[in-house]
Image: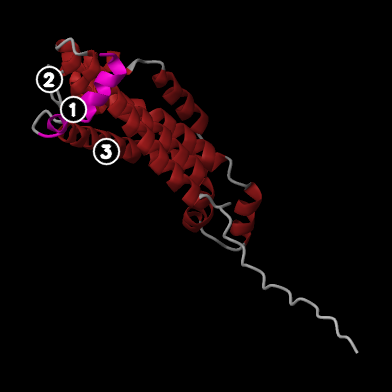
Amino acid sequence: MGAIPGAWGWLTTGTNWTGTDGVLQRLAEHLVLTSVSMTIACVLALPVAVLLGHLGRGGALAVNLSNIGRAVPTFAVLVLLIVATNSARYWPTIIALVLFAVPPLLTNTYVGMHQVDRDAVEAARGMGMTGGQLLFRVELPLAAPFVMSGVRSAAVQVVATATLAAIPGEGGLGRIITAGFAQYDTAKVVAGAVLVAALALLVEGVFLALQRLLSPTRKARPARRPARPTPQMEFS
């Protein structure tokens, strides 16, 4: 049996979805790991990027430093954290994922704040808006698509990279892949990879919908014009 038909057979077998090692359990672990990592990364990166973009100072340095962090492999960071902390629990993986998610969050948010239409900002300032009102009523709404783009990019990357949690023996969909390798079961490896890819695509779609929903340029449906009455000809 080939890898693809074998993976389909594995995914359509009900017993593979239940139990402590089933897909549903591993999916729940993967979602928790991703959610915790993304929440911490957003709390750390978004306020800093918003403030730097609002002030217009220090943002370029912060973005360059965060981009340098992208060059460091997440796997290497994970191994170093496990060795340094002498722990195989979730925290080394979470820290590695947070460091991986911060650069796109910081970069996109700062760029979005920095590229807000200056005319709109000056007009709002001329109307007497305070700094806080300017930030929350003008700059953040206009920068929202860029912010959501960064969140979407980071979330998809974290979902895919969270499979590394299986390396130190923790949960997540990566455990299905590592178990398949250990059992020399190619179909199981492919099935685990398909599940990770499907979850990443689902997250991509959800955040893309949110990004479009928050776009300030989203046009409302135009009101339907009333039909013009058909002129009638009179015959004498």
Q: Quadrant of residue 31?
A: top left
Q: Which residues are magenta?
A: 1-18
Viewer can see residue 56: no
Q: Position of residue 25 (x, y in %)?
A: 15, 34
For image coordinates 67% across by 73% down, the residue present is: 226
Looking at this rendering, what residue extends furthest in the front direction?
236
* Cα–Cα span, label 1 and label 3: 13 Å
* Kind of residue indicated by mark 1: Trp
Q: Check contact, mark 1 vs mark 3: CB within 8 A.
A: no
Q: Which circle, 3 or 2, is nearer the viewer?
A: 3
Quadrant holding the N terminus: top left
* Tag 3 secondary structure: helix
For image coordinates 38% across by 33% down, the residue present is: 201
* Kind of residue indicated by mark 2: Ser
- Position of residue 156 relative to residue 115, above or below, is above
Please say whether residue 11 is one of the residues in the magenta stretch. yes
Please say whether residue 224 is one of the residues in the magenta stretch. no
For image coordinates 88% across by 86% down, the residue present is: 235
Q: Residues within 10 Å of mark 3 (few under 14, many from 20)?
A: some
Q: Position of residue 103 (x, y in %)?
A: 41, 28
Q: Check contact, mark 3 vs mark 2: CB within 8 A.
A: no
* Cα–Cα span, label 3 and label 2: 21 Å
* Cα–Cα span, label 1 and label 2: 8 Å
Q: Residue 87: which disc?
A: 2
Viewer can see residue 12: yes
Q: Check contact, mark 1 vs mark 2: CB within 8 A.
A: yes
Counting residues from the N terminus, which is met first, the one under dot 3 or under dot 2?
3
Residue that label 1 marks = 91
In this view of the protein, which residue sits in the foreground, 38 or 228? 228
Residue that label 3 marks = 35
Counting residues from the N terminus, which is met first, the one under dot 1 or under dot 3?
3
Q: Which circle, 1 or 3, is nearer the viewer?
A: 3
